[in-house]
């Protein structure tokens, strides 16, 4: 089973993501950025970015170092809604995809499946 | 600086001192000459008065001598006459007189000549017969006397004068004159004598005032002193030949042997006698007045010389002071002029009562007049100057206040129009002087041109306002960004769990309806937060080159469709390949919001004008909101003919949630969104408005490159289909319809399904019906890739195109593995779709 690691400060969103992805069949480990103790190797990392235009971009680098080689999906309440998924914004942050909050269930699943495929 | 010097005086300092030196020399020479002349004239006068004094003395004593000589001669003649007459009488008439009465008769005769003391008759033996003073002593015999002997012997014809002798009869000093008495035969019978008492003579001489140190000497031609006044009894009878000799010399001065003094002497001979009158006057005494006069004159001359010298010295020192003063004045003037020049100030000095105005050249220039214009009174200055009408009341008031004593100093800033039409700000300061009645009589001051400072001040105020604005906007932006972040999390949870709840909710139930409403409300909230994020500038969008022209054209196309009938749209798009770096969606929002605002401003119709062009900024420019650095820009101008924007609104219209619309009609985020996006793109906004006429928004965006305009899609150039049946699957009905439309227009036969399960069922029913499947990825019932798999299972070779908003490159990479013919990115572009369809279908055939 594919392992997804989620870094999200907001407990509501964290719960929702956990619920969606678990239901879809993925193994999910989630937590806040500092508290997260997901040591397991991740097939995909979802990171919630605050102030993506400023300080937030730096934490992406930390996470990449923590999970070398794993693809990243960045989510943020400060992405323009409808931001193109794998476009310039994603590249500028150094992630594979960006998704703007509030997340839609199917958008997230599409993105996850698009990167790592089905859970099995 | 040279100009100033030459203006203040024609003479350079060096030449001045030469002139002054010559002047000083002239004064000294002149003074000395005057003194010399005065001294010389005094000396000449002294010499002249000396000569005069001498001459006067000599004249005087000469006259005196002559007069006395004449007088003496007369006396002698009188004596002689007496003797002659007495002799004749004695000879003829005396016989008739009794001898005792002869004395009396002689006395009578003697009385005729007061100087004669006694007349005697002496016989031929020398016996005194008769005397006028009574009978003489019978034994008085004068036979031994010279006067007797001379007559007896006949050695002295006529009258004989004896030497001074002492008479035997009385013992007095005197001189005896004698004449011979002859009988009728001419035989000597005796003499008649007349005794002249020298003392009596002296009495006569004493009456004459010969002045100080003067003396009258009666001498014989051998120098024998007979009479002297003042009396010197010791000298009488002595002989002083020098005296006699002096008479021969003209203007004589000699050492008088009698009194041993230097005397002036004049000698006059007594006619026909051996007598001389010598009048002497002591030189010292005679010249004493002259001497004292001369001393006085010398003293006066000295004093005047000293005064003269002092005057000259005073003149010279005064001259020195004057030149020093002149130099100091010149230096002071220069200093003042230079100070004024250096300070670039104009200066005025107004004599209030007489209305005489002095204006420095600089002051005239400041007032907009030429430096050499002739303005001499305030009246004429006020007539010729043009003061800004807005400033004029303040200008007048400042002067009146100061003159009334309300302000200790005069200070006023006002605008003056220069000949070239430009207005310049002047800052004038001054003070008036008040006389004893408290009325101002003199008003002086200076003024400088502060136009530069004023405009700098205005610029500074403008920048400060802008800074405050931008700081405010930034603060708001940070707040909004934070809000958007948190709200998106919350909204995500509501939408997410809501969606899950809906899934478990029976259709057409009340619960479903409630949940639907919750979702709708939350969707609205999501849109609102999107816009808040938009103006907050915290939102991360694309940062890619965006061709501005294409975005504007696209937006205008959309706008055109919804434009009210009474609003006309006028466009001029001319920006070619100009590109800005940013997010196309945001740019689209800018255009849209501006146009929407413009439309809303024209409630009763009007003209909406949209212009897009390029502009170059050469100097940093400050706009209503933001500043432009030099460089190339693309300019979007949206103007309307609406009601305009009042100033109060103008200040706040970019504030988020500020709206002039009624509550509920608009959230007031449109312009704040425009502001946030434009600022983020590095641009600026300029707003000009006229209340009642309309407004004009200028959006300046810095050009960061050139990108080709995406080619206009003309259906004609697109690859078309040939009626192939295309299955379209998308859970959003609207997208299905849109896709159907596009595909139909491309010449295909679209069949749309809004449900993946329905589509699969349809495919199972008639696998051969469809030539191509076009499916969305994210669908609730079955995602696209699953559907594709299922369909492949039914018909392995059918071309399947997947549409996805997400997944992107990863999905494309795995497309082949999954069995997809192509992956298309949403939103769908007509061209991409046409080409993909054509390509995929071609590979099949």
Image (cartoon, helix red, strand yellow):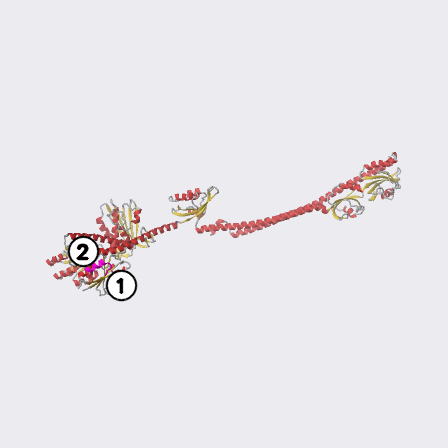
In front: B99, or B274? B99
Q: Residue furthest left?
A: B765
Q: Is residue B723 left or right of residue B482?
A: left
Q: Which mark is residue B800?
A: none
Residue B522: x and y in percent read 21, 53
Q: Residue furthest top?
A: B96
**Number of other residues with Cα within 10 Å of mark 1, as a class: few under 14, some 14 to 19, many 20 or more:** few
**Number of other residues with Cα within 10 Å of mark 2, as a class: few under 14, some 14 to 19, many 20 or more:** some
Residue at image mark 1:
A62
Say if labels 1 and 2 share a chain.
no
Q: Which chain hosts label 1?
A: A
Q: Main secondary structure of the magenta part?
A: helix
Residue B44: x and y in percent read 66, 47
Magenta stretch contains residue A16: yes
* The N terminus of chain A, quarter of image: bottom left
Q: Which mark is residue B499?
A: 2
Q: Is residue A96 left or right of residue B464?
A: left
Magenta stretch contains residue B297: no
Residue B138: x and y in percent read 88, 40
Q: Is residue B505 left or right of residue B350?
A: left
B90 relative to B708, above or below? above
Q: Nearer the viewer, mark 1 or mark 2?
A: 2
B197 relative to B531, above or below? above
Residue B541: x and y in percent read 25, 57
Count of numbered labels shown in the rendering: 2
Kind of element beneath mark 1: helix
Kind of element beneath mark 2: helix
Residue B810 visible in the displayed image: yes
Residue B577 visible in the displayed image: no
In front: B483, or B3? B483
Identify the magenta region.
A5-20
Q: CA distance from mark 1 to mark 2?
A: 33 Å
């Amino acid at each position: 089973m594919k392992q997804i690691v989620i870094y999200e400060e907001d407990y509501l969103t964290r719960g929702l993501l956990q619920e969606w992805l678990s239901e879809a069949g993925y193994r999910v480990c989630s937590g806040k950025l500092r508290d997260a103790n997901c040591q397991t190797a991740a097939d995909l990392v979802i990171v919630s970015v605050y102030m993506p235009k400023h300080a937030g971009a730096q934490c992406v680098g930390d996470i990449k170092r923590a999970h070398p080689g794993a693809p990243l999906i960045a989510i943020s309440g400060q992405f323009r809604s409808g931001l193109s998924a794998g476009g310039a914004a994603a590249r500028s942050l150094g992630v594979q995809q960006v998704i703007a909050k509030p997340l839609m269930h199917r958008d997230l699943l599409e993105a996850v499946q698009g990167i790592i495929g089905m859970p099995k | 600086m040279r100009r100033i010097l030459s203006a203040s005086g024609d003479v350079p300092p060096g030449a001045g001192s030469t002139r002054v030196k010559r002047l000083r020399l002239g004064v000294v020479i002149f003074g000395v000459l005057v003194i010399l002349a005065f001294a010389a004239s005094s000396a000449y006068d002294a010499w002249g008065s000396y000569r005069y004094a001498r001459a006067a003395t000599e004249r005087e004593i000469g006259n005196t001598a002559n007069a006395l000589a004449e007088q003496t001669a007369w006396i002698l003649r009188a004596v002689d006459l007496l003797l002659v007459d007495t002799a004749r009488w004695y000879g003829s008439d005396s016989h008739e007189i009794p001898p005792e009465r002869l004395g009396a008769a002689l006395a009578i005769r003697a009385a005729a000549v007061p100087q004669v003391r006694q007349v005697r008759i002496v016989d031929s033996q020398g016996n005194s017969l008769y005397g006028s003073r009574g009978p003489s002593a019978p034994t008085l015999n004068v036979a031994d006397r010279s006067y007797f002997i001379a007559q007896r012997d006949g050695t002295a014809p006529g009258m004989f004068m004896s030497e001074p002798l002492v008479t035997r009869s009385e013992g007095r000093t005197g001189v005896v004159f004698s004449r011979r008495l002859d009988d009728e035969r001419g035989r000597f019978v005796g003499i008649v004598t007349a005794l002249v008492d020298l003392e009596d003579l002296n009495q006569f001489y004493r009456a004459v005032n010969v002045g100080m140190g003067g003396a009258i000497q009666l001498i014989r031609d051998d120098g024998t002193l007979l009479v002297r006044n003042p009396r010197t009894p010791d000298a009488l009878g002595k002989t002083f030949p020098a005296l006699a000799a002096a008479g021969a010399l003209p203007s004589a001065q000699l050492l008088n042997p009698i009194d041993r003094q230097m005397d002036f002497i004049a000698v006059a001979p007594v006619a026909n006698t051996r007598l001389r009158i010598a009048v002497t006057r002591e030189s010292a005494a005679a010249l004493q007045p002259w001497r004292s006069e001369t001393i006085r004159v010398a003293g006066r001359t000295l004093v005047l010389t000293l005064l003269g010298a002092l005057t000259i010295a005073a003149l010279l020192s005064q001259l020195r002071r004057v030149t020093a003063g002149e130099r100091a004045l010149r230096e002071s003037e220069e200093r003042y002029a230079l100070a004024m020049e250096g300070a670039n100030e104009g200066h005025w000095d107004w004599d209030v009562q007489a209305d005489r105005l002095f204006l420095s050249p600089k002051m005239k220039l400041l007032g907009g007049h030429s430096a050499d214009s002739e303005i001499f009174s305030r009246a004429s200055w006020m007539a010729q100057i043009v003061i800004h009408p807005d400033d004029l009341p303040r200008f007048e008031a400042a002067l009146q206040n100061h003159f009334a004593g309300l302000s200790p100093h005069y200070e006023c800033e006002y605008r003056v129009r220069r000949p070239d039409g430009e207005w310049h700000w002047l800052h004038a300061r001054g003070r008036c002087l008040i006389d004893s009645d408290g009325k101002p009589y003199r008003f002086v001051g200076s003024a400088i041109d502060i136009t530069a400072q004023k405009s700098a001040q205005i610029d500074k105020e403008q920048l400060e306002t802008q800074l405050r604005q931008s700081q405010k906007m930034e603060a708001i932006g940070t707040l909004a960004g934070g809000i958007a972040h948190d709200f998106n999390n919350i909204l995500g949870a509501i939408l997410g769990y809501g969606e899950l709840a809906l899934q478990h909710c029976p259709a057409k139930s009340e619960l479903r309806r409630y949940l639907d409403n919750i979702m709708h409300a939350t969707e609205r909230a999501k849109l609102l937060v999107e816009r808040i994020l938009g103006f907050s500038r915290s939102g991360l969008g694309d940062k890619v080159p965006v061709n501005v022209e294409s975005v504007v054209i696209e937006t205008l196309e959309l706008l055109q469709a919804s434009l009210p009938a009474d609003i006309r749209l006028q466009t001029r798009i001319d920006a070619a390949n100009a590109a800005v770096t940013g997010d196309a969606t945001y740019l689209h929002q800018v255009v849209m919001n501006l146009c929407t605002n413009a439309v809303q401003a024209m409630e009763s119709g009007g003209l909406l004008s949209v212009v897009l062009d390029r502009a170059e900024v050469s100097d940093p420019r400050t706009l209503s909101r933001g500043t432009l650095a030099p460089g190339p820009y693309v300019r979007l101008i949206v103007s309307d003919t609406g009601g305009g924007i009042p100033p109060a609104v103008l200040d706040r219209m970019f504030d988020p949630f500020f709206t002039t619309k009624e509550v509920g009609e608009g959230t007031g985020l449109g312009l704040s969104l425009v502001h946030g996006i434009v600022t983020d793109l590095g641009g600026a906004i300029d707003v000009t408005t006229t209340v009642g006429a309309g407004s004009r928004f200028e959006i300046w965006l810095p050009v960061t490159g050139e990108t080709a305009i995406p080619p206009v899609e003309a259906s004609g150039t697109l690859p078309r289909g040939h009626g192939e049946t295309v299955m379209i699957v998308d859970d959003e009905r609207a997208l299905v319809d849109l896709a159907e439309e596009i595909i139909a227009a491309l010449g295909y036969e679209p069949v749309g399904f809004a449900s993946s399960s329905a589509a699969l069922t349809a495919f199972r029913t008639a696998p051969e019906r469809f030539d191509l499947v076009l499916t969305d990825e994210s669908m609730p019932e079955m995602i696209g890739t699953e559907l594709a798999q299922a369909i492949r299972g039914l018909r392995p070779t059918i071309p399947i195109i997947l549409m996805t908003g997400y997944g992107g490159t990863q999905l494309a990479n795995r497309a082949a593995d999954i069995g997809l013919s192509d992956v298309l990115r949403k939103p769908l572009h007509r061209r991409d779709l046409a080409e993909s369809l054509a390509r995929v279908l071609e590979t099949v055939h």
